[in-house]
Image (spheres, rainbow, N blue to C red):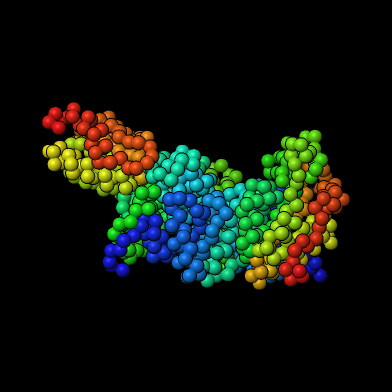
Amino acid sequence: MSEKELLKGNIAIAKAALNCGCTCYFGYPITPQTEIGEYLSIEMQKNKLAYVCAESEIAAINMALGAASTGAKVMTSSSSCAVSLMQETISYACSDELPIVIVNVMRAGPGQGYIFPSQGDYNQATTGGGNGDYHTIVLSPTNVQECIDLTYRAFYLAQKYRNPVILLADGLLGQMAEPAELIDNPYPQIDNSNWRLDGAKSRPSREIHSLEVNQNKLNQHIINMYKKYEAIEKDECDFEEYLCEDAEIIFTAFGSLARHVKSVCNYYRSKGVKAGLFRPKTLYPFPYRKLNDLSKKVKIFIDVEMNMGQMLKDIRLSILSNAKISFIGKPVGNWLKEEEIINAADNIIKEHYASI
Amino acid sequence: MQVYSTPKAIKENSNFTFCPGCDHGLAIKTIAHVIDELNIRENTIAVASSGCSVFLYNFLDVDCIESPHGRACAVATGVKRAHKAQGNNKFVFTYQGDGDFASIGLAESMHSALRGENITAICINNTNYGMTGGQLGPTTAMGQITTTSQNGRNREYHGFPIKTAEQIAQCEGTCFSARVALYDIKNIINTKNTIKKAFEYQNQNLGFSFVEILSSCPTNWKLSPKESHEKIKTELSQIFPLGVLKDVKND
Protein backbone atom coordinates (compact mmCIF):
# COMPACT_ATOMS: atom_id res chain seq x y z
CA MET A 1 0.00 0.00 0.00
CA SER A 2 2.33 2.69 -1.15
CA GLU A 3 0.38 4.41 -3.88
CA LYS A 4 -1.65 7.56 -3.65
CA GLU A 5 -5.36 7.23 -4.31
CA LEU A 6 -8.20 9.68 -4.53
CA LEU A 7 -9.82 9.58 -1.08
CA LYS A 8 -12.57 11.46 0.71
CA GLY A 9 -11.60 12.58 4.21
CA ASN A 10 -14.33 10.50 5.83
CA ILE A 11 -13.32 7.35 3.95
CA ALA A 12 -9.66 7.99 4.71
CA ILE A 13 -10.44 8.08 8.44
CA ALA A 14 -12.43 4.84 8.20
CA LYS A 15 -9.72 3.06 6.20
CA ALA A 16 -6.98 4.18 8.57
CA ALA A 17 -9.00 2.99 11.57
CA LEU A 18 -9.34 -0.48 10.07
CA ASN A 19 -5.71 -0.48 9.02
CA CYS A 20 -4.45 0.03 12.55
CA GLY A 21 -6.61 -2.66 14.11
CA CYS A 22 -9.82 -0.91 15.18
CA THR A 23 -12.16 -3.81 15.96
CA CYS A 24 -15.14 -1.88 17.34
CA TYR A 25 -17.22 0.94 15.88
CA PHE A 26 -20.47 2.31 17.26
CA GLY A 27 -22.28 5.23 15.65
CA TYR A 28 -25.44 7.07 14.73
CA PRO A 29 -25.90 8.92 11.42
CA ILE A 30 -25.33 12.66 11.15
CA THR A 31 -24.17 14.76 8.21
CA PRO A 32 -21.35 15.43 7.31
CA GLN A 33 -19.65 12.33 8.75
CA THR A 34 -22.08 9.54 7.82
CA GLU A 35 -19.75 7.94 5.24
CA ILE A 36 -17.45 6.81 8.07
CA GLY A 37 -20.17 4.59 9.52
CA GLU A 38 -21.40 3.49 6.11
CA TYR A 39 -17.95 2.42 4.96
CA LEU A 40 -17.19 0.63 8.23
CA SER A 41 -20.56 -1.16 8.26
CA ILE A 42 -19.53 -3.02 5.12
CA GLU A 43 -15.94 -3.76 6.05
CA MET A 44 -16.50 -4.61 9.70
CA GLN A 45 -19.44 -6.92 9.12
CA LYS A 46 -17.45 -8.66 6.41
CA ASN A 47 -14.71 -9.34 8.95
CA LYS A 48 -17.06 -10.12 11.88
CA LEU A 49 -15.89 -7.14 13.89
CA ALA A 50 -18.02 -5.24 16.40
CA TYR A 51 -20.33 -2.81 14.59
CA VAL A 52 -23.57 -1.44 16.02
CA CYS A 53 -25.99 1.05 14.46
CA ALA A 54 -26.65 2.59 17.86
CA GLU A 55 -30.02 4.03 18.87
CA SER A 56 -28.38 7.36 19.76
CA GLU A 57 -25.00 8.99 20.15
CA ILE A 58 -25.44 8.50 23.89
CA ALA A 59 -25.71 4.77 23.35
CA ALA A 60 -22.84 4.79 20.82
CA ILE A 61 -20.33 6.42 23.16
CA ASN A 62 -21.39 4.12 25.99
CA MET A 63 -20.94 1.06 23.80
CA ALA A 64 -17.50 2.49 23.04
CA LEU A 65 -16.87 2.85 26.80
CA GLY A 66 -17.72 -0.82 27.39
CA ALA A 67 -15.70 -2.01 24.40
CA ALA A 68 -12.69 0.08 25.45
CA SER A 69 -12.72 -1.60 28.87
CA THR A 70 -11.83 -4.88 27.13
CA GLY A 71 -8.62 -3.35 25.73
CA ALA A 72 -9.96 -3.30 22.16
CA LYS A 73 -9.26 -0.45 19.75
CA VAL A 74 -12.54 1.45 19.64
CA MET A 75 -13.88 4.32 17.55
CA THR A 76 -17.05 6.34 17.28
CA SER A 77 -17.68 9.26 14.95
CA SER A 78 -20.19 12.06 14.90
CA SER A 79 -20.62 15.75 14.32
CA SER A 80 -20.94 18.82 16.53
CA CYS A 81 -24.46 18.89 18.05
CA ALA A 82 -24.37 15.10 18.39
CA VAL A 83 -20.89 15.13 19.92
CA SER A 84 -22.56 17.30 22.55
CA LEU A 85 -24.63 14.24 23.47
CA MET A 86 -21.44 12.28 24.16
CA GLN A 87 -19.90 14.70 26.63
CA GLU A 88 -21.08 12.95 29.81
CA THR A 89 -19.44 9.68 28.85
CA ILE A 90 -16.27 11.40 27.61
CA SER A 91 -15.92 12.71 31.18
CA TYR A 92 -16.44 9.15 32.50
CA ALA A 93 -13.89 7.74 30.02
CA CYS A 94 -11.27 10.27 31.18
CA SER A 95 -11.81 9.33 34.82
CA ASP A 96 -11.99 5.61 33.95
CA GLU A 97 -8.81 6.08 31.87
CA LEU A 98 -10.26 4.29 28.87
CA PRO A 99 -8.92 4.73 25.33
CA ILE A 100 -11.61 5.77 22.86
CA VAL A 101 -11.09 7.53 19.52
CA ILE A 102 -13.88 10.05 18.88
CA VAL A 103 -14.04 11.62 15.42
CA ASN A 104 -15.86 14.94 15.20
CA VAL A 105 -16.41 16.07 11.60
CA MET A 106 -17.56 19.56 12.55
CA ARG A 107 -20.69 21.21 11.17
CA ALA A 108 -22.17 24.57 12.03
CA GLY A 109 -23.72 25.36 15.40
CA PRO A 110 -24.85 26.37 17.92
CA GLY A 111 -27.72 23.98 18.47
CA GLN A 112 -28.62 22.16 15.30
CA GLY A 113 -26.98 24.89 13.15
CA TYR A 114 -26.69 23.23 9.79
CA ILE A 115 -24.40 21.04 7.70
CA PHE A 116 -22.24 23.99 6.60
CA PRO A 117 -18.62 23.56 7.57
CA SER A 118 -17.37 25.40 10.64
CA GLN A 119 -14.63 25.24 13.25
CA GLY A 120 -17.05 26.06 16.05
CA ASP A 121 -16.22 23.07 18.25
CA TYR A 122 -12.68 24.11 19.21
CA ASN A 123 -13.85 25.05 22.69
CA GLN A 124 -15.98 21.94 23.13
CA ALA A 125 -13.12 19.67 22.09
CA THR A 126 -10.30 21.35 24.00
CA THR A 127 -12.05 22.38 27.20
CA GLY A 128 -14.69 19.67 27.23
CA GLY A 129 -18.42 19.76 27.69
CA GLY A 130 -18.44 17.17 30.45
CA ASN A 131 -18.15 17.74 34.18
CA GLY A 132 -15.06 17.77 36.34
CA ASP A 133 -11.31 18.12 35.86
CA TYR A 134 -10.17 16.32 32.72
CA HIS A 135 -8.63 16.72 29.29
CA THR A 136 -9.10 14.94 26.02
CA ILE A 137 -6.23 14.89 23.54
CA VAL A 138 -7.36 16.78 20.40
CA LEU A 139 -5.77 16.28 16.96
CA SER A 140 -6.50 18.58 14.04
CA PRO A 141 -5.91 17.35 10.47
CA THR A 142 -5.41 19.85 7.64
CA ASN A 143 -5.77 17.53 4.64
CA VAL A 144 -6.86 14.01 3.74
CA GLN A 145 -3.34 12.66 4.22
CA GLU A 146 -3.39 13.93 7.78
CA CYS A 147 -6.83 12.35 8.27
CA ILE A 148 -4.95 9.06 7.83
CA ASP A 149 -1.79 10.00 9.75
CA LEU A 150 -3.65 11.50 12.70
CA THR A 151 -6.17 8.64 12.89
CA TYR A 152 -3.21 6.32 13.45
CA ARG A 153 -1.81 8.75 15.98
CA ALA A 154 -5.19 9.06 17.72
CA PHE A 155 -5.37 5.30 18.33
CA TYR A 156 -1.75 5.24 19.48
CA LEU A 157 -2.08 8.15 21.92
CA ALA A 158 -5.40 6.82 23.26
CA GLN A 159 -3.79 3.49 24.12
CA LYS A 160 -0.50 5.00 25.30
CA TYR A 161 -2.13 7.41 27.76
CA ARG A 162 -5.38 5.49 28.38
CA ASN A 163 -7.39 8.57 27.52
CA PRO A 164 -10.01 9.53 24.94
CA VAL A 165 -8.64 11.25 21.83
CA ILE A 166 -10.75 13.53 19.64
CA LEU A 167 -9.91 13.76 15.95
CA LEU A 168 -11.32 17.21 15.15
CA ALA A 169 -11.96 17.30 11.40
CA ASP A 170 -14.50 19.46 9.60
CA GLY A 171 -17.23 19.05 7.01
CA LEU A 172 -15.03 20.37 4.23
CA LEU A 173 -12.31 17.83 4.97
CA GLY A 174 -14.78 14.99 5.49
CA GLN A 175 -16.47 15.56 2.15
CA MET A 176 -13.44 16.58 0.08
CA ALA A 177 -11.53 14.07 -2.06
CA GLU A 178 -7.84 14.49 -2.77
CA PRO A 179 -4.87 12.18 -3.32
CA ALA A 180 -3.56 10.52 -0.20
CA GLU A 181 -1.52 7.47 0.64
CA LEU A 182 -2.80 4.81 3.00
CA ILE A 183 0.56 4.28 4.64
CA ASP A 184 1.11 1.49 7.17
CA ASN A 185 0.42 2.26 10.81
CA PRO A 186 3.79 3.48 12.10
CA TYR A 187 3.02 3.08 15.80
CA PRO A 188 3.74 0.15 18.13
CA GLN A 189 1.08 -1.86 19.97
CA ILE A 190 0.62 -0.93 23.63
CA ASP A 191 0.31 -3.76 26.15
CA ASN A 192 -2.94 -3.51 28.13
CA SER A 193 -2.91 -6.89 29.87
CA ASN A 194 -2.52 -5.23 33.28
CA TRP A 195 -5.83 -3.37 33.25
CA ARG A 196 -8.28 -4.70 30.66
CA LEU A 197 -11.44 -6.54 31.71
CA ASP A 198 -11.41 -10.06 30.29
CA GLY A 199 -12.62 -12.13 33.25
CA ALA A 200 -10.76 -12.59 36.54
CA LYS A 201 -8.97 -15.79 35.54
CA SER A 202 -5.96 -16.58 37.74
CA ARG A 203 -5.79 -12.98 38.94
CA PRO A 204 -7.75 -10.71 41.32
CA SER A 205 -10.91 -9.18 39.88
CA ARG A 206 -10.67 -5.65 38.45
CA GLU A 207 -13.02 -2.69 38.75
CA ILE A 208 -13.27 0.26 36.40
CA HIS A 209 -15.28 3.12 37.86
CA SER A 210 -15.33 6.88 38.31
CA LEU A 211 -17.40 6.83 41.51
CA GLU A 212 -15.20 7.25 44.56
CA VAL A 213 -16.81 7.77 47.96
CA ASN A 214 -13.48 8.46 49.72
CA GLN A 215 -12.60 12.12 49.09
CA ASN A 216 -8.86 11.62 49.65
CA LYS A 217 -8.82 8.84 47.08
CA LEU A 218 -10.81 10.95 44.61
CA ASN A 219 -8.42 13.87 45.11
CA GLN A 220 -5.44 11.60 44.54
CA HIS A 221 -7.03 10.06 41.45
CA ILE A 222 -7.48 13.47 39.83
CA ILE A 223 -3.97 14.56 40.81
CA ASN A 224 -2.65 11.38 39.16
CA MET A 225 -4.68 12.15 36.03
CA TYR A 226 -3.05 15.58 35.91
CA LYS A 227 0.44 14.07 36.22
CA LYS A 228 -0.46 12.16 33.06
CA TYR A 229 -1.65 15.37 31.38
CA GLU A 230 1.66 17.03 32.35
CA ALA A 231 3.51 14.27 30.50
CA ILE A 232 1.18 14.67 27.51
CA GLU A 233 1.79 18.44 27.48
CA LYS A 234 5.54 17.89 27.67
CA ASP A 235 5.86 15.17 25.04
CA GLU A 236 2.98 15.33 22.59
CA CYS A 237 2.70 18.94 21.38
CA ASP A 238 2.70 18.92 17.61
CA PHE A 239 2.57 21.81 15.16
CA GLU A 240 3.57 22.95 11.68
CA GLU A 241 5.69 26.03 11.10
CA TYR A 242 5.56 27.47 7.59
CA LEU A 243 8.05 30.24 6.77
CA CYS A 244 8.18 31.13 10.46
CA GLU A 245 11.99 31.27 10.76
CA ASP A 246 12.44 34.89 9.68
CA ALA A 247 8.77 35.91 9.91
CA GLU A 248 7.76 39.30 11.26
CA ILE A 249 4.07 38.55 10.93
CA ILE A 250 2.71 35.16 11.91
CA PHE A 251 -0.70 33.90 10.95
CA THR A 252 -2.21 31.23 13.19
CA ALA A 253 -4.85 28.81 11.94
CA PHE A 254 -5.86 25.18 12.45
CA GLY A 255 -7.40 22.43 10.34
CA SER A 256 -8.18 22.72 6.66
CA LEU A 257 -8.54 26.52 6.84
CA ALA A 258 -4.78 26.71 7.43
CA ARG A 259 -4.26 25.77 3.78
CA HIS A 260 -5.88 29.00 2.64
CA VAL A 261 -3.74 30.89 5.12
CA LYS A 262 -0.62 29.23 3.70
CA SER A 263 -1.50 30.69 0.29
CA VAL A 264 -2.00 34.05 1.98
CA CYS A 265 1.56 33.79 3.36
CA ASN A 266 2.87 33.05 -0.12
CA TYR A 267 1.09 36.14 -1.43
CA TYR A 268 2.64 38.37 1.22
CA ARG A 269 6.10 36.88 0.69
CA SER A 270 5.77 37.80 -3.03
CA LYS A 271 5.10 41.36 -1.87
CA GLY A 272 8.20 41.38 0.31
CA VAL A 273 6.33 40.95 3.58
CA LYS A 274 7.88 38.36 5.87
CA ALA A 275 4.75 36.39 6.72
CA GLY A 276 4.57 32.87 8.12
CA LEU A 277 2.00 30.37 9.37
CA PHE A 278 1.92 28.58 12.68
CA ARG A 279 -0.54 25.66 12.73
CA PRO A 280 -1.12 23.61 15.88
CA LYS A 281 -1.72 19.94 15.00
CA THR A 282 -2.50 19.16 18.63
CA LEU A 283 -5.15 21.54 19.98
CA TYR A 284 -4.75 19.82 23.34
CA PRO A 285 -1.94 19.80 24.29
CA PHE A 286 -1.68 23.33 22.86
CA PRO A 287 1.85 24.43 21.87
CA TYR A 288 1.92 27.43 24.23
CA ARG A 289 5.67 27.32 24.76
CA LYS A 290 6.58 27.30 21.07
CA LEU A 291 4.25 30.20 20.33
CA ASN A 292 5.61 32.08 23.31
CA ASP A 293 9.14 31.67 21.94
CA LEU A 294 8.01 32.96 18.53
CA SER A 295 6.23 35.93 20.11
CA LYS A 296 9.54 37.24 21.42
CA LYS A 297 10.77 38.01 17.89
CA VAL A 298 7.55 38.60 15.95
CA LYS A 299 5.75 41.96 15.72
CA ILE A 300 2.21 40.82 15.09
CA PHE A 301 0.06 37.72 15.11
CA ILE A 302 -3.06 37.35 13.00
CA ASP A 303 -5.34 34.51 14.06
CA VAL A 304 -7.70 33.18 11.37
CA GLU A 305 -10.55 30.84 12.26
CA MET A 306 -13.94 29.71 10.99
CA ASN A 307 -15.60 30.64 14.27
CA MET A 308 -15.81 33.78 16.39
CA GLY A 309 -12.31 33.38 17.82
CA GLN A 310 -12.11 30.25 19.89
CA MET A 311 -8.40 29.37 19.47
CA LEU A 312 -7.74 33.07 19.88
CA LYS A 313 -7.76 32.79 23.69
CA ASP A 314 -5.04 30.12 23.57
CA ILE A 315 -2.98 32.30 21.21
CA ARG A 316 -3.36 35.18 23.67
CA LEU A 317 -2.32 32.96 26.56
CA SER A 318 0.76 31.97 24.55
CA ILE A 319 2.03 35.34 23.44
CA LEU A 320 0.87 37.32 26.50
CA SER A 321 1.84 40.96 25.88
CA ASN A 322 4.91 40.13 23.80
CA ALA A 323 3.26 41.02 20.48
CA LYS A 324 0.09 42.46 18.99
CA ILE A 325 -2.70 40.10 18.03
CA SER A 326 -5.58 40.52 15.59
CA PHE A 327 -8.39 38.20 14.60
CA ILE A 328 -9.97 37.44 11.22
CA GLY A 329 -12.91 35.06 11.17
CA LYS A 330 -16.51 34.23 10.45
CA PRO A 331 -18.64 31.64 12.19
CA VAL A 332 -19.91 29.29 9.46
CA GLY A 333 -20.16 28.58 5.75
CA ASN A 334 -17.67 28.51 2.90
CA TRP A 335 -14.15 28.91 4.20
CA LEU A 336 -12.77 32.45 4.12
CA LYS A 337 -11.20 32.88 0.70
CA GLU A 338 -7.59 33.99 0.34
CA GLU A 339 -8.76 37.39 -1.00
CA GLU A 340 -11.04 37.87 1.99
CA ILE A 341 -8.24 37.09 4.40
CA ILE A 342 -5.85 39.34 2.49
CA ASN A 343 -8.36 42.24 2.46
CA ALA A 344 -8.75 42.02 6.20
CA ALA A 345 -5.07 41.40 6.86
CA ASP A 346 -3.93 44.33 4.65
CA ASN A 347 -5.37 46.82 7.09
CA ILE A 348 -3.62 45.16 9.97
CA ILE A 349 -0.31 44.85 8.13
CA LYS A 350 -0.35 48.39 6.69
CA GLU A 351 0.67 49.77 10.03
CA HIS A 352 3.92 47.86 9.71
CA TYR A 353 4.51 47.82 5.93
CA ALA A 354 3.52 51.16 4.42
CA SER A 355 4.38 49.95 0.94
CA ILE A 356 1.46 47.49 0.54
CA MET B 1 -23.71 -30.78 58.10
CA GLN B 2 -23.03 -27.41 56.46
CA VAL B 3 -26.25 -26.01 55.07
CA TYR B 4 -24.99 -22.61 53.92
CA SER B 5 -21.74 -20.98 52.87
CA THR B 6 -20.99 -17.56 51.43
CA PRO B 7 -20.68 -17.79 47.64
CA LYS B 8 -17.14 -17.81 46.26
CA ALA B 9 -18.13 -14.98 43.91
CA ILE B 10 -18.57 -12.67 46.93
CA LYS B 11 -15.37 -10.83 47.88
CA GLU B 12 -13.71 -11.98 51.07
CA ASN B 13 -14.37 -9.86 54.16
CA SER B 14 -16.90 -7.69 52.35
CA ASN B 15 -19.82 -6.45 54.40
CA PHE B 16 -22.89 -5.18 52.64
CA THR B 17 -23.28 -1.44 53.19
CA PHE B 18 -26.93 -1.22 52.16
CA CYS B 19 -29.63 -0.03 54.58
CA PRO B 20 -30.95 -2.63 57.05
CA GLY B 21 -33.59 -4.78 55.36
CA CYS B 22 -32.73 -3.65 51.84
CA ASP B 23 -32.96 -6.48 49.30
CA HIS B 24 -29.89 -5.37 47.32
CA GLY B 25 -27.58 -7.51 49.48
CA LEU B 26 -29.80 -10.55 49.07
CA ALA B 27 -30.06 -9.99 45.32
CA ILE B 28 -26.28 -9.70 44.90
CA LYS B 29 -25.71 -12.79 47.04
CA THR B 30 -28.26 -14.71 44.98
CA ILE B 31 -26.49 -13.68 41.76
CA ALA B 32 -23.19 -14.79 43.32
CA HIS B 33 -24.64 -18.23 44.11
CA VAL B 34 -25.70 -18.61 40.47
CA ILE B 35 -22.24 -17.52 39.25
CA ASP B 36 -20.75 -20.23 41.51
CA GLU B 37 -23.16 -22.91 40.33
CA LEU B 38 -22.53 -22.13 36.65
CA ASN B 39 -18.79 -21.80 37.31
CA ILE B 40 -18.56 -18.59 35.26
CA ARG B 41 -16.79 -16.26 37.73
CA GLU B 42 -13.56 -16.16 35.74
CA ASN B 43 -15.36 -15.55 32.45
CA THR B 44 -17.71 -12.82 33.68
CA ILE B 45 -17.72 -9.07 33.22
CA ALA B 46 -20.43 -7.29 35.21
CA VAL B 47 -21.75 -3.80 34.45
CA ALA B 48 -22.80 -1.75 37.48
CA SER B 49 -24.95 1.35 37.10
CA SER B 50 -25.83 4.48 39.06
CA GLY B 51 -27.77 4.62 42.30
CA CYS B 52 -27.50 2.01 45.06
CA SER B 53 -26.72 -0.67 42.47
CA VAL B 54 -23.38 0.96 41.64
CA PHE B 55 -21.78 -0.68 44.69
CA LEU B 56 -22.00 -4.10 43.05
CA TYR B 57 -18.23 -4.17 42.50
CA ASN B 58 -17.55 -3.69 46.19
CA PHE B 59 -19.08 -7.11 46.86
CA LEU B 60 -19.00 -9.23 43.73
CA ASP B 61 -15.61 -10.77 42.95
CA VAL B 62 -15.75 -10.50 39.15
CA ASP B 63 -14.36 -8.00 36.63
CA CYS B 64 -16.70 -5.03 36.70
CA ILE B 65 -17.20 -1.69 34.94
CA GLU B 66 -19.47 1.08 36.20
CA SER B 67 -21.79 2.67 33.67
CA PRO B 68 -23.12 6.22 33.46
CA HIS B 69 -26.71 6.46 34.72
CA GLY B 70 -29.02 4.45 32.50
CA ARG B 71 -26.45 3.27 29.98
CA ALA B 72 -25.59 -0.12 31.45
CA CYS B 73 -27.09 -2.13 28.58
CA ALA B 74 -25.16 -0.03 26.04
CA VAL B 75 -21.92 -0.50 28.00
CA ALA B 76 -22.64 -4.24 28.26
CA THR B 77 -23.26 -4.33 24.50
CA GLY B 78 -19.80 -2.85 23.95
CA VAL B 79 -18.15 -5.30 26.36
CA LYS B 80 -19.88 -8.32 24.85
CA ARG B 81 -19.32 -7.39 21.21
CA ALA B 82 -15.71 -6.27 21.67
CA HIS B 83 -14.84 -9.65 23.17
CA LYS B 84 -16.79 -11.45 20.47
CA ALA B 85 -14.82 -9.57 17.80
CA GLN B 86 -11.67 -10.98 19.41
CA GLY B 87 -13.13 -14.48 19.35
CA ASN B 88 -14.02 -14.59 23.05
CA ASN B 89 -17.46 -15.45 24.38
CA LYS B 90 -17.58 -13.69 27.75
CA PHE B 91 -20.50 -13.74 30.15
CA VAL B 92 -21.82 -10.18 30.53
CA PHE B 93 -24.63 -8.95 32.75
CA THR B 94 -25.90 -5.61 34.03
CA TYR B 95 -27.13 -4.83 37.54
CA GLN B 96 -29.45 -1.83 37.53
CA GLY B 97 -32.22 -0.15 39.48
CA ASP B 98 -35.64 0.53 38.00
CA GLY B 99 -34.85 4.23 37.52
CA ASP B 100 -31.65 3.31 35.73
CA PHE B 101 -33.14 0.59 33.53
CA ALA B 102 -36.64 1.86 32.86
CA SER B 103 -36.48 5.66 33.11
CA ILE B 104 -33.25 7.40 32.13
CA GLY B 105 -31.97 4.28 30.36
CA LEU B 106 -35.17 3.02 28.74
CA ALA B 107 -33.89 3.60 25.21
CA GLU B 108 -30.63 1.71 25.84
CA SER B 109 -32.47 -1.09 27.68
CA MET B 110 -35.19 -1.59 25.12
CA HIS B 111 -32.92 -1.32 22.09
CA SER B 112 -30.57 -3.89 23.59
CA ALA B 113 -33.58 -6.20 23.92
CA LEU B 114 -34.73 -5.38 20.37
CA ARG B 115 -31.27 -6.16 18.99
CA GLY B 116 -31.39 -9.44 20.86
CA GLU B 117 -28.12 -8.45 22.46
CA ASN B 118 -26.75 -11.58 24.06
CA ILE B 119 -26.51 -10.15 27.57
CA THR B 120 -28.52 -10.45 30.79
CA ALA B 121 -30.01 -7.49 32.65
CA ILE B 122 -30.99 -7.69 36.31
CA CYS B 123 -33.30 -4.86 37.38
CA ILE B 124 -33.93 -4.12 41.05
CA ASN B 125 -37.42 -2.63 41.21
CA ASN B 126 -38.02 -0.90 44.55
CA THR B 127 -40.56 1.58 43.14
CA ASN B 128 -38.55 4.70 43.97
CA TYR B 129 -35.20 6.48 43.60
CA GLY B 130 -33.59 5.00 46.69
CA MET B 131 -30.16 6.58 46.88
CA THR B 132 -31.45 10.14 46.61
CA GLY B 133 -33.97 9.61 49.37
CA GLY B 134 -37.08 8.10 47.81
CA GLN B 135 -38.45 10.19 44.95
CA LEU B 136 -41.10 9.18 42.43
CA GLY B 137 -39.67 6.87 39.78
CA PRO B 138 -40.90 5.11 36.66
CA THR B 139 -42.26 2.19 38.71
CA THR B 140 -43.83 4.10 41.60
CA ALA B 141 -47.31 2.62 42.05
CA MET B 142 -50.51 4.67 41.68
CA GLY B 143 -51.25 6.27 45.03
CA GLN B 144 -47.75 5.60 46.41
CA ILE B 145 -46.35 8.37 48.57
CA THR B 146 -42.80 9.53 47.79
CA THR B 147 -40.93 12.76 48.54
CA THR B 148 -42.01 14.12 45.14
CA SER B 149 -45.55 12.70 45.25
CA GLN B 150 -46.50 13.53 48.79
CA ASN B 151 -50.21 13.05 48.16
CA GLY B 152 -49.57 9.82 46.32
CA ARG B 153 -48.86 9.16 42.64
CA ASN B 154 -51.74 10.44 40.56
CA ARG B 155 -52.67 10.49 36.93
CA GLU B 156 -52.91 14.26 36.64
CA TYR B 157 -49.33 15.05 37.63
CA HIS B 158 -47.39 11.80 37.24
CA GLY B 159 -49.13 9.44 34.87
CA PHE B 160 -48.68 5.69 35.10
CA PRO B 161 -45.89 3.32 36.16
CA ILE B 162 -44.11 1.08 33.66
CA LYS B 163 -44.42 -2.69 33.85
CA THR B 164 -40.87 -3.36 32.79
CA ALA B 165 -40.79 -7.14 32.47
CA GLU B 166 -43.94 -7.06 30.32
CA GLN B 167 -42.48 -4.34 28.07
CA ILE B 168 -39.19 -6.20 27.62
CA ALA B 169 -41.10 -9.42 26.90
CA GLN B 170 -42.68 -7.63 23.92
CA CYS B 171 -39.30 -7.21 22.22
CA GLU B 172 -38.54 -9.81 19.56
CA GLY B 173 -34.91 -10.07 20.60
CA THR B 174 -35.80 -11.01 24.17
CA CYS B 175 -35.38 -14.72 24.91
CA PHE B 176 -36.41 -14.57 28.55
CA SER B 177 -38.22 -12.06 30.74
CA ALA B 178 -39.45 -12.67 34.27
CA ARG B 179 -40.42 -10.89 37.47
CA VAL B 180 -39.48 -12.35 40.84
CA ALA B 181 -39.35 -11.29 44.49
CA LEU B 182 -37.30 -12.00 47.60
CA TYR B 183 -39.89 -11.75 50.40
CA ASP B 184 -39.66 -15.35 51.60
CA ILE B 185 -37.50 -18.47 51.26
CA LYS B 186 -39.64 -19.94 48.51
CA ASN B 187 -39.32 -16.76 46.44
CA ILE B 188 -35.58 -16.45 47.12
CA ILE B 189 -35.09 -19.98 45.76
CA ASN B 190 -37.30 -19.14 42.78
CA THR B 191 -35.30 -15.96 42.16
CA LYS B 192 -32.09 -17.96 42.13
CA ASN B 193 -33.51 -20.50 39.68
CA THR B 194 -34.89 -17.72 37.48
CA ILE B 195 -31.57 -15.85 37.35
CA LYS B 196 -29.86 -19.14 36.62
CA LYS B 197 -32.16 -19.74 33.67
CA ALA B 198 -31.57 -16.20 32.35
CA PHE B 199 -27.80 -16.71 32.65
CA GLU B 200 -27.96 -20.12 30.98
CA TYR B 201 -29.93 -18.64 28.07
CA GLN B 202 -27.10 -16.16 27.52
CA ASN B 203 -24.60 -19.00 27.55
CA GLN B 204 -26.75 -20.67 24.89
CA ASN B 205 -26.65 -17.47 22.78
CA LEU B 206 -30.45 -17.14 22.78
CA GLY B 207 -30.61 -13.35 23.02
CA PHE B 208 -31.51 -10.74 25.63
CA SER B 209 -32.51 -12.17 29.01
CA PHE B 210 -34.12 -10.08 31.72
CA VAL B 211 -35.03 -10.52 35.38
CA GLU B 212 -36.90 -7.85 37.32
CA ILE B 213 -36.64 -8.29 41.09
CA LEU B 214 -39.30 -6.65 43.28
CA SER B 215 -37.16 -5.40 46.14
CA SER B 216 -37.66 -3.71 49.46
CA CYS B 217 -36.55 -0.20 50.34
CA PRO B 218 -37.49 0.02 54.06
CA THR B 219 -35.70 3.34 54.67
CA ASN B 220 -37.61 5.24 52.00
CA TRP B 221 -40.84 3.30 52.37
CA LYS B 222 -40.66 4.16 56.08
CA LEU B 223 -41.50 0.58 56.98
CA SER B 224 -39.67 -2.11 58.92
CA PRO B 225 -37.90 -4.82 56.89
CA LYS B 226 -40.68 -7.24 57.76
CA GLU B 227 -43.43 -4.77 56.81
CA SER B 228 -41.58 -4.05 53.57
CA HIS B 229 -41.60 -7.70 52.55
CA GLU B 230 -45.27 -7.90 53.53
CA LYS B 231 -45.93 -4.89 51.24
CA ILE B 232 -44.25 -6.65 48.33
CA LYS B 233 -46.20 -9.83 49.01
CA THR B 234 -49.64 -8.28 49.41
CA GLU B 235 -49.52 -5.03 47.41
CA LEU B 236 -46.71 -4.75 44.88
CA SER B 237 -46.92 -8.29 43.52
CA GLN B 238 -50.59 -7.54 42.72
CA ILE B 239 -49.58 -4.50 40.64
CA PHE B 240 -46.45 -6.13 39.24
CA PRO B 241 -47.40 -9.82 38.96
CA LEU B 242 -44.65 -12.36 39.55
CA GLY B 243 -43.89 -14.94 36.92
CA VAL B 244 -42.29 -15.62 33.57
CA LEU B 245 -43.46 -13.16 30.90
CA LYS B 246 -41.49 -14.68 28.07
CA ASP B 247 -39.50 -17.85 27.59
CA VAL B 248 -38.51 -18.72 24.02
CA LYS B 249 -38.11 -22.36 24.98
CA ASN B 250 -41.75 -22.62 26.08
CA ASP B 251 -43.40 -20.23 23.62
Between A300 and A236, the one nearer to me in the picture: A300
Between B170 and A289, the one nearer to me in the picture: B170
In the rendered image, the quadrant that contains the N terminus of chain B is: bottom right
In the rendered image, the quadrant that contains the C terminus of chain B is: bottom right
Q: Can residue A234 be seen in the rendering of this structure?
A: no
Examine the rendered structure and indicate whether residue A168 appears above or below residue A204: above
Q: Residue at x 39, y 48 (%)?
A: A171
Q: Which residue is drawn at 41% across and 64% down?
A: A18
**Which quadrant would residue A186 be assigned to in this image?**
bottom left
Between B132 and A337, the one nearer to me in the picture: A337
Q: Residue at x 60, y 52 (%)?
A: B71
Between B38 and B111, the one nearer to me in the picture: B111
**Which quadrant would residue A20 be assigned to in this image?**
bottom left
Residue B118 percent location from the top left of the image: 62, 65
Residue B78 percent location from the top left of the image: 55, 60
Task: Answer left or right for B129 relative to B227.
Answer: left
Q: Can residue B194 be seen in the rendering of this structure?
A: yes
Q: Residue at x 79, y 68 (%)?
A: B2
Task: Answer left or right for A230 relative to A277.
Answer: right
Residue B77 percent location from the top left of the image: 58, 60
**Which quadrant would residue B25 be assigned to in this image?**
bottom right
